[in-house]
Image (cartoon, rainbow, N blue to C red):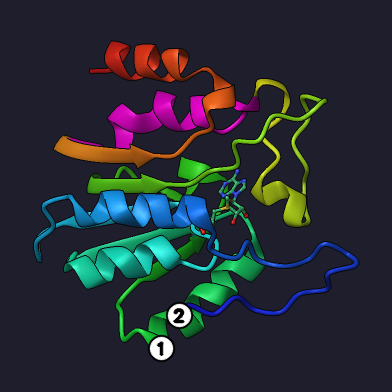
């Protein structure tokens, strides 16, 4: 069971509720080999739904990262409800990592293209708005992947077909 903390809808202050894109990644996660020694990272965690999925799959260590304070608060009840051990850190993508390596990284970042480059600094829009081209966060995650992926590790990254899948593939390949 996953709960989303109620927010101020008018002020667009709420945590992204798990949706079809979340479910897609959960299905992909279930196909991964996960053991008690698997170190998992959930980048852009929202409610922590993907962290919970990693816990249910048996990952030994799980770190959830999100820039939204509400999101980090929201991970707590989900951790308790699902009896999962998850560390939650608030921060801008990988900036809160301290050289740690992960065997399994799941990320459902904002990926919807918008009309301006500047990314929203707050509000629910921050959960989906990825700037013109929709790659504001995708490119940063891919660029940093060699720093946070353990040798042989997997990155499950969700994006829209509107945001140039070929570019993602090329960037991932370039980085091995
Ligand atoms: C599409 S939601 C995904 C939430 C959850 N992982 C899921 O699949 O249901 C994207 C999340 O990215 C977070 N986010 C946006 N910009 C971020 C950044 N620079 N660093 C970390 N998290 C960010 C938002 O707060 C939001 O919770």
Q: Which element is circle 1 on?
A: helix
Residue 126: x %, y % from top left: 71, 48
Rendered position, 131 above or below 122: above
In the picture of the structure, the residue carrying the numbered disc 2 is 78
Residue 35: x %, y % from top left: 9, 61
Residue 44 in sight here: no
Q: Nearer the viewer, residue 98 or 132?
A: 132
The disc at residue 81 is: 1
Q: Nearer the viewer, residue 110 or 31?
A: 31
Residue 160: x %, y % from top left: 54, 32
How far apart, in angstroms, are the residues tagged by discs 2 and 1?
5 Å
Residue 113 in sight here: yes
Rendered position, 106 above or below 6: above
Q: Residues within 10 Å of mark 2 (few under 14, many from 20)?
A: many
Residue drawn at x 56%, y 52% is: 91
Rendered position, 149 above or below 51: above
User: Tag count in the figure?
Assistant: 2
Most common SS among magenta residues: helix
Instruction: Tell me which segment is drawn in magenta.
Output: 134-150
- 50 left or right of 2? left
Q: Nearer the viewer, residue 54 or 71?
A: 54
User: Which residue, as the protein is rendered here, is positioned at the far right?
Assistant: 10
Q: Which quarter of the picture shows residue 114?
A: top right
Residue 60: x %, y % from top left: 17, 67
Rendered position, 106 above or below 119: below
Q: Is residue 117 magenta?
A: no
Q: Are discs 2 and 1 less than 8 Å apart at CB?
A: yes
Residue drawn at x 22%, y 18% is: 176
């Amino acid at each position: 069971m996953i709960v989303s903390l109620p927010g101020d809808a008018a002020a667009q202050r709420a945590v992204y509720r798990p949706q079809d894109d979340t479910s897609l990644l959960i299905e992909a996660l279930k196909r991964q080999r996960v053991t008690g020694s698997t170190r998992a990272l959930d980048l852009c965690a929202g409610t922590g739904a993907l962290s919970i999925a990693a816990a249910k799959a048996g990952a030994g260590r799980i770190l959830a990262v999100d820039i939204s304070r509400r999101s980090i608060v929201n991970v707590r009840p989900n951790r308790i409800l699902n009896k999962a051990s998850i560390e939650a850190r608030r921060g801008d993508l990988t900036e809160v990592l301290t050289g740690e390596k992960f065997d399994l990284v799941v990320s459902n970042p904002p990926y919807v293209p918008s009309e301006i480059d500047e990314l929203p600094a707050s509000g629910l829009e921050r959960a989906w708005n990825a700037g013109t081209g929709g790659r504001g966060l995708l490119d940063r995650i891919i660029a940093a992947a060699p720093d946070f992926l353990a040798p042989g590790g997997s990155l499950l990254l969700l994006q829209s077909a509107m945001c140039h899948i070929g570019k993602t593939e090329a960037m991932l390949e370039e980085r091995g």
